[in-house]
Amino acid sequence: MKRLSGWLKTASVLTALAFTSTASATTGYFGLGFGAKAMGLAGATVSNPQDSIAASTNPAGMALVGERVDINVRFFSPAKRNAELSTTALGATFDVKDESRRNLFVIPNLGFTSQINDKLWWGMSIYGNGGMNTSYDRNIYDEANVVLGAFFAGGPPAAAAVPEGTTTPALAAIGALPKANANVGTLGVDLAQALFAPTLSMKVNQKHTVGASLLIGVQRFSARGLGNFQCFTKTVAANPGGNPSCAFGVADIPSTGLTNNDSDWSYGAGVRLGWIGDVHPRVTLGASASSKVYMTEFDDYDELFAEDGDFDIPAMASASVTFKATPKVNLSFDVERIFYEGVDSISNAGPIPTAAGPGIPPGSGPLGTDNGLGFGWEDINVYRLALDYQHNNEWTFRGGLALNDQPIPDDQVLFNMIAPAVIRKHATLGFTYRPNNTSEWNFAYMHAFKETVDSDVTAFGIPGKIDMYQNSVDVGYAMKF
């Protein structure tokens, strides 16, 4: 009981730390793996569980890793997250572009397992997701909006006359606009997710293990600088004049549920089921499936996300095979499907170009409605291939590769400038050092290769692009009982 009490105290501290800054935009906005051992395998752990964070992928694995406590810290750097709108296409002398300045995040992941009897185990994995975490010094939308407005008023010569860095508040200050939208300063969003997975896992027999986890989700979200999209909110659409009440792109009666409302919190639950089976002395199969985690609404952002601020965590399913090539070498291959299209606020289409500037696509509605504008993400597959080599009782070495589909279509670049989760290719390395029989140190490094999504015609009617690459280092300590 003492050791469990101590673990819970540690868990509470690290969970609080998780909400200070979280990002993990690798396979969309899910982490590639959770814990240093999983990261060393590029997340290929559905049939090859490594530690007590195993319930993050397959709850059946919790009965196969022994009694232990794992504490892991990830130092995650989504470097060079760039966003650009090519205003030179309108005749401007510059393109509007910036790099997000939030490039280092600390993410804890942890877990424990304990044996109830010969067949039954229980435990908990705690892990974090994120990825929509950006902070731009320049408001790309507002500066491009100035150039777009000048172009509509006087064509390319007027666009060419706009000095770089001009904003709508600056124009309103000198009387060039009757008024300017509020909340068009620093641009960015911050999404942090923590998932608690209390788990029961049972050894049905010597070859087959099953498990079930309750997924308890906690989310925190904030957005800044989205004032240019006031005219796309349901508040403005409900005005007697509808969208035409947005003279000069400024809402007469702005929404209070779109942006700059500090942090809001959301809570919810789902389930994950899993199985691992030794079907041959050298072959182990695994499978797991997670329901959607149904979350309460972000009330303070009910006119940003569809369905009045709903932002559920998508469902997913995985299948895996591990082949014991030699007594010391395992090869694992995992396939995962993430169902982003099951969450409207993530998958609904974003704005489209029209003759008058950005517009709402046919069949879609204003921000915050059931069919409201979203990020346009699509379902993706994730493929993982990994090798682990147990050199001796002290050292184990790991390596992995992962490839996933692109969740962001080319025509959805505009909204995704605040959430450029474009990564597709990953390579990982890791190792474990065991100084004795009751403890181990784990390390992993990940590089996610640079990926770009660009469009010849964004909703602003001009080319745009987003790109990024990533690095991360995981350090973990485990105590075995």
Image (cartoon, grey):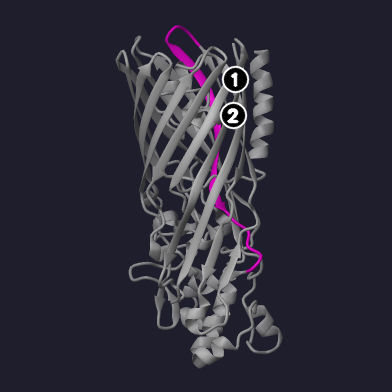
Along the line of sight, the residue nearer the viewer: 172 or 74: 74
Residue 128 belongs to magenta span: yes
Magenta span: chief secondary structure: strand
Q: Residue furthest left?
A: 280
The kind of residue on which mark 2 rests is: Phe
Residue extent of the magenta highlight = 116-138
Q: Is residue 317 left or right of residue 111?
A: left
Along the line of sight, the residue nearer the viewer: 305 or 398: 398
Q: Is residue 135 visible?
A: yes
Residue at 46% x, 48% y: name it: 28
Residue at 56% x, 64% y: name it: 258
Residue where numbered disc 2 is placed: 443
Residue where numbered disc 1 is placed: 433
Name the secondary structure under disc 1. Answer: strand
Q: Between marks 2 and 1, how big is the CA–CA gap?
A: 9 Å
Q: How many marks?
A: 2
Along the line of sight, the residue nearer the viewer: 481 or 123: 481
Q: Residue 120, position in %: x, y?
A: 44, 13
